[in-house]
Amino acid sequence: MIRLHGPRLLALFAVVFASLPAFAHPGHGKDGGSNELVHYATEPVHVAPFAFAALAGVAAAALVAWFRRKA
């Protein structure tokens, strides 16, 4: 098993965060229209994280309710 702590964990975060600009897509930057709400509401790259977070929240609430019923 690989243990990530100290310098290894820091190196992992550095590599991940350094590569984030590569995930940019058209519509960003100067005159790209990224300041418009429509861009954030219609681009899957922006909608997916919020949808995943909402789904995770619903799943967590369902798990809590299930555990409370069993107790």
Image: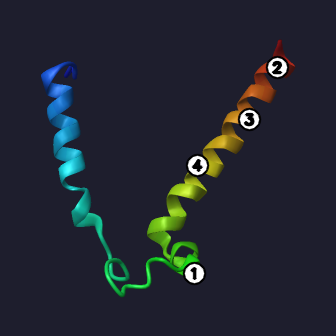
Residue underneath mark 4: 53
Q: Residue at x 48, y 77 (%)?
A: 35
x%, y% of residue 50?
57, 57
Query: How far is mark 3 from mark 4, CA to CA?
Result: 12 Å
Query: How far is mark 4 from mark 2, CA to CA?
Result: 22 Å
Question: To which quarter of the image does residue 13 belong?
Answer: top left
Query: How far is mark 2 from mark 3, CA to CA?
Result: 11 Å
Residue underneath mark 2: 68
Residue positioned most to the right: 69
Query: How far is mark 4 from mark 1, CA to CA?
Result: 20 Å
Front disc: 4 or 2: 4
Residue underneath mark 3: 61
Sequence-wise, which precedes: disc 4 or disc 1?
Answer: 1
The disc label shown at residue 38, or none: 1
Contact? badges 4 and 2 (CB < 8 Å): no
Contact? badges 4 and 1 (CB < 8 Å): no
> Mark 3 Cα within 10 Å, few/some/many (few <14, many 20+)?
few
Q: Image check: 43 left or right of 70?
A: left
x%, y% of residue 58?
71, 43
